[in-house]
Amino acid sequence: MKSQKNLFQYLDRQASLWVFLLAAAFAFYHIYNVADRFQAFEWNGLHVGVYSQLLWNMSHGRFISAVLGATLMQLHLPLVMVLAIPVYAWIADPYILAVLQTLALAAGCLGVYSIGRIYLAETGALLLSVVYCVFPPLLEVNAANFHPLALSVPFVALSVTAFLRRRSVLFLLALVAVTACDARLGCALRLLCSDGGRFGGCPQ
């Protein structure tokens, strides 16, 4: 009983370190796993081709080009993809999309921990992050395709954390980042986090 208590005390003291290690392990494992799937032509969803082609065109100055009849502005406004242009200009490889998506999902682990810390002790928040990392639908996101919406995961977590902690400036900045990933999600999040048009309405 005493040893169990000491274990929880140790986890409480070192929870921040463990959650960073958890996020790093998640990123390393899935980047390696996706690399294997990519080499075996199993990471081959439609969006991989669409967005890799769009990024290649934009990295060569063709910002108005269309893929399958749709331009960047018509694909649910994933403006965050513009930030990936310098990376894609340096390494023109569709695998870059897998790395970016995996890093975003790994960062979401830190966001889940920050939300959990509002309501739970350090150990509880850490366990919540572990659940996030093994959640089957989340793992399926990275299985075979690229989803711009997945890039919004850490920003959604940041906006929820800022909202719950009443950090209005940080909330608005995170909301802009979410909207840059998907305009529909940004609008939906703004409506969900509003209370008669005011920033508030969530329990302390």
Image: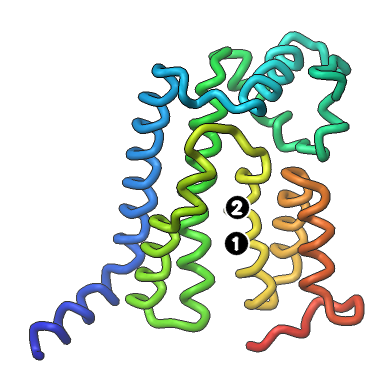
Q: Residue at x 84, y 58 (%)?
A: 187
Q: Looking at the figure, which quarter contains the N terminus?
A: bottom left
Q: Residue at x 49, y 41 (%)?
A: 103
Q: Amino acid at mark 1?
A: Ala
Task: Pick whichever, 48 or 175, lies toward us.
Answer: 48
Badge 1 is on which residue? 157
Question: Relative to 21, does residue 7 appear above or below in the rendering?
Answer: below
Q: Residue at x 69, y 24 (%)?
A: 51
Disc 2 to disc 1: CB gap under 8 Å = yes
Residue pushed farthest right? 197
Question: Relative to 101, does residue 24 appear above or below in the rendering?
Answer: below
Q: Secondary structure at mark 2?
A: helix
Which dot marks residue 153?
2
Q: Looking at the figure, which quarter contains the C terminus?
A: bottom right
Residue 111 screen position, x and y as percent: 52, 61
Residue 128 screen position, x and y as percent: 41, 69
Q: Amino acid at mark 2?
A: Val
Residue 89 occupies quadrant: top right
Q: Rate crowding at label 2 as few (under 14), some (14 to 19) or many (20 or more) other CA atoms within 10 Å.
A: many
Q: Residue at x 79, y 18 (%)?
A: 67
Residue 116 screen position, x and y as percent: 48, 74
Relative placement, left or right, of 81 versus 99 is right
